[in-house]
Image: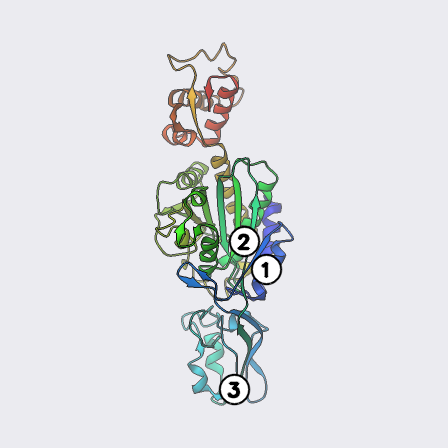
């Protein structure tokens, strides 16, 4: 896992300088780099395409931007940090006084040494973000202002990677790729998704795993419109194939893991993540669904109501570095990302192995010793746990309790219950 942590941190650092937005070449370049690790399918959706209640916006690209003082010195420079420009700023080239400029400047007076992150996707404007400290030092003079951007018909770009499973039932893992130089929100989520995809691709999973790298909100809305709808009607059969899902975000800060349940609240993914977090002894928080946060808002909108939860460390807007220049690669650690990855991996182990069985010898307890099962998994300090798990699996395997039900009811770790079920299955004492 340490290697995985270092690999993920290297990917965060490599992607960090790119100026991403909900459209444009920053997203394309990001997907190209992700594509070096997993073979991504890239989708380009034209400006103006109707997607659910929205339209794909015009594409935004930016080459340079600055505020120059009367000596010609760049006092604010896009080349230093892409956070300096309000995302989706329309082009501007003008000279103006500080007072005229002020209406276009954004600072964080409470965090005067940090640059805020601001966007204006759906209202045409332009602006700069800067340290309040920088603004305080600007003399009252005329400034040259340039934003060399284009806002024009083009495309919205997203990427998909599918790990084929033995069944067509899907697990959807999604993360947003629309933030510029911000590390925890959400390059850490991207890096964890890439590593998880690679690990899953090395197995022959039961589920088909679909990884979606798309701009926040408009990207998931576009994906839903193109994949789960037939005209204005829900493609119910297609939607039903999505059995579980996770939105990954803020995956690399030093805070404890937080899982936000799906809108359903009791979906298998909700119970699987809760079980993994509880039985691992990790510090964690479980919260109920709320219609705010990341793309779970779209996946859990009432028409879709998909079983999709959201895994973060410190959640949305819950840390002072959030949406500022302090959310940089030093704010995320290899260890925290490795911990998030291993949690995701354990969750997939539960989803992969969870199913109900039927006891083939339900009248009285079967004689385990005769079948070599009593103490057969012994020689370990957890023998007692194994024996208990065997009794629980035999007792509750009536076709209606899954292994996760049994793990929850018995208080035993899922892996112990699943290993025992495998042994009982091999001994023909239970069947699927
Ligand atoms: Zn954000």
Label 3 sits on residue: 94
Q: Is residue 197 above or below residue 114?
A: above
Which tag, 1 or 2, sits closer to the chain's start?
1
Residue 128, how many percent across, how many down? 49, 76
Which tag, 3 or 1, sits closer to the chain's start?
1
Label 1 sits on residue: 30
Residue 336, how many percent across, how many down? 52, 49
Q: Is residue 238 above or below residue 25?
A: above
Residue with the most extreme front position = 231
Residue at (51, 24) in percent of width and height: 422
CA gap between label 2 and label 3 equals: 38 Å
Residue nearest the viewer, comparing 208 with 225:
225
Q: Secondary structure at mark 3?
A: strand
**How crowded is the residue under tag 2: few (<14 C-alpha within 10 Å), some, or many (20+)?**
many
Label 2 sits on residue: 190
Q: Are marks 3 and 1 in contact (CB under 8 Å)?
A: no
* Image disc number at residue 242: none
């Amino acid at each position: 896992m340490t290697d995985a942590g270092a690999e993920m941190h290297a990917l965060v650092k490599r992607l960090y300088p790119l100026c991403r937005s909900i459209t444009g070449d920053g997203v394309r370049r990001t997907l190209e780099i992700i594509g070096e690790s997993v073979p991504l399918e890239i989708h380009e959706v034209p400006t103006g395409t109707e997607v659910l209640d929205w339209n794909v916006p015009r594409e935004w690209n930016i080459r340079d931007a600055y505020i120059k003082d009367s000596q010609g010195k760049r006092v604010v420079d896009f080349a230093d940090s892409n956070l300096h420009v309000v995302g989706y700023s329309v082009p501007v080239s003008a000279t103006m006084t500080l007072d005229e400029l002020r209406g276009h400047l954004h600072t964080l007076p409470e965090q005067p040494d940090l640059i805020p992150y601001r966007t204006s996707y759906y209202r045409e404007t332009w602006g700069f973000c800067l340290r309040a400290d920088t603004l305080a030092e600007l003399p009252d003079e005329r400034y040259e202002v340039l934003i060399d951007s284009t806002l024009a018909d083009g495309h919205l770009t997203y990427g998909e990677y599918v790990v084929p499973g033995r069944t067509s039932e899907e697990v959807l893992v999604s993360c947003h790729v629309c933030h510029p130089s911000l590390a925890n929100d959400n390059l850490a989520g991207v890096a964890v998704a890439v590593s998880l995809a690679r690990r899953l691709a090395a197995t022959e999973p039961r589920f088909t795993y679909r990884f979606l790298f798309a701009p926040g909100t408009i990207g998931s809305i576009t994906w839903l419109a193109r994949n789960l709808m037939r005209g204005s009607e829900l493609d119910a059969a297609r939607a039903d194939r999505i059995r579980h899902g996770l939105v990954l975000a803020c995956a690399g800060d030093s805070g404890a893991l937080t899982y936000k349940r799906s809108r359903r609240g009791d979906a298998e993914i909700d119970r699987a993540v809760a079980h993994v977090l509880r039985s691992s002894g990790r510090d964690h928080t479980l919260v109920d669904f709320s219609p705010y946060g990341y793309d779970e808002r779209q996946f859990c909108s009432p028409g879709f109501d998909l079983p999709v939860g959201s895994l973060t460390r410190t959640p949305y807007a819950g840390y002072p570095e959030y949406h500022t220049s302090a959310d940089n690669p030093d704010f995320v650690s290899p260890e925290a990302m490795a911990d998030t990855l291993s949690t995701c991996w354990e969750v997939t182990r539960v989803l992969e192995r969870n199913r109900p069985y039927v006891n083939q010898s339900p009248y009285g307890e079967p004689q385990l010793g005769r079948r070599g099962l009593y103490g057969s998994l012994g020689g370990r300090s957890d023998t007692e746990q194994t024996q208990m798990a065997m009794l629980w699996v035999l007792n509750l395997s009536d076709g209606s309790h899954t292994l996760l039900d049994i793990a929850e009811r018995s208080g035993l770790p899922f892996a112990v219950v699943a290993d025992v079920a495998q042994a009982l299955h091999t001994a023909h004492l239970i069947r699927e």
